Image: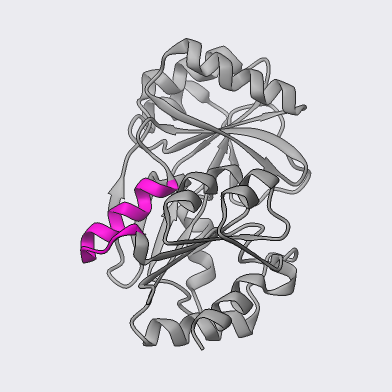
Amino acid sequence: MYKLIVSDFDGTLIDKEGRIPLSTVLLLDDLRRKKIKIAIATGRCLKSVLDYNKDFTICDYLITSNGAYIYDISGKSVIFRKNIGIRTVKKIIKEFSSQAIIYLTDHNTWNLISKKGAYSKEFDVVKVLDQEKFLEENKTNIYKIELYFETLLLAKNCLKQMQELNLRIHANLQTNEGKYLVEITYQEISKLKGVEKILSKYKWSLDDVIVFGDGYNDIELMKKAGLGVAVSSAIEEVKKAADDITLDSNQKGVEKYLRSIFK
């Protein structure tokens, strides 16, 4: 029987209104009472997901910033964090500030470095007015960089440039609401590595894990987990990596699949 359930957040667990259905919340609570651990693995910063646990705890662990910041909810403690070196941050800003909209993510907010944001409505975003001061005060507190591009081609070209810069980073392509972005963390950071940090605590293996996802940053974990399940709205690369496919988030795909497994 599976011991750890890991779900992506946006496009997988929450619906188009940004909500987790009550029936899903109740199911997750029931599974946790049966000693099954639940983790959310997301590119979001900690606060953005922690807010969903204010009234009702829905999971045990939050793997945020694609694995760069991992939080134990019951213990109210950070069990792992790894920032991007400040020299690397500055080099990326210098290299791409004229090509992309740039956000620097600490554990609480997205900090907008560019003059304008990628979205018309933005939440948990702080506009950086003094870049030099911000970077000086956050030398060890930047866990992820997001570079937004107007086209897929530009985003892919960015990935090629990253390789040429030979930086100690991990970069992957992602899409969000029809936008193309490159997500950057420290070189050994990923959702997979984040899950492995949790597994080591219990001496469990990846065979004990069910994972749900929809985007590029889920593929590596999807391939390694005991059972990888893509939602029907996932990109094709994720579907190919998955063992099975469930309904999309608006049709409570994660919940319905879990009910079929844990009858």
Q: Nearer the viewer, residue 12 or 236?
A: 236
Direction from residue 186 to residue 237 in the image, left or right: right
Q: Nearer the viewer, residue 74 or 263?
A: 263
The residue shown at (44%, 83%) is 31
Total marks shown come to: 0
Direction from residue 89 to residue 73 in the image, left or right: left
Where residue 112 appears, as percent x and y from the top left, is: 60, 34
The residue shown at (63%, 73%) is 20
Magenta residues span 191-206
Where residue 100 appears, as percent x and y from the top left, is: 67, 23
**Magenta span: chief secondary structure:** helix
Residue 262 part of the magenta-drawn span: no
Direction from residue 204 to residue 55 in the image, left or right: right
Q: Quadrant of the N terminus?
A: bottom left
Q: Quadrant of residue 207?
A: bottom left
Q: Indicate the colouring scheme.
A: one colour
Q: Quadrant of residue 248?
A: bottom right
Q: Quadrant of residue 148?
A: top right
The residue shown at (36%, 68%) is 73
Q: Nearer the viewer, residue 84 or 181?
A: 181
Where residue 179 appears, as percent x and y from the top left, is: 74, 38
The residue shown at (53%, 19%) is 93
Direction from residue 188 to residue 175 in the image, left or right: right
Where residue 46 appears, as percent x and y from the top left, is: 46, 55
* Above/below status of 252 relative to 176: below
* Above/below status of 37 relative to 84: below
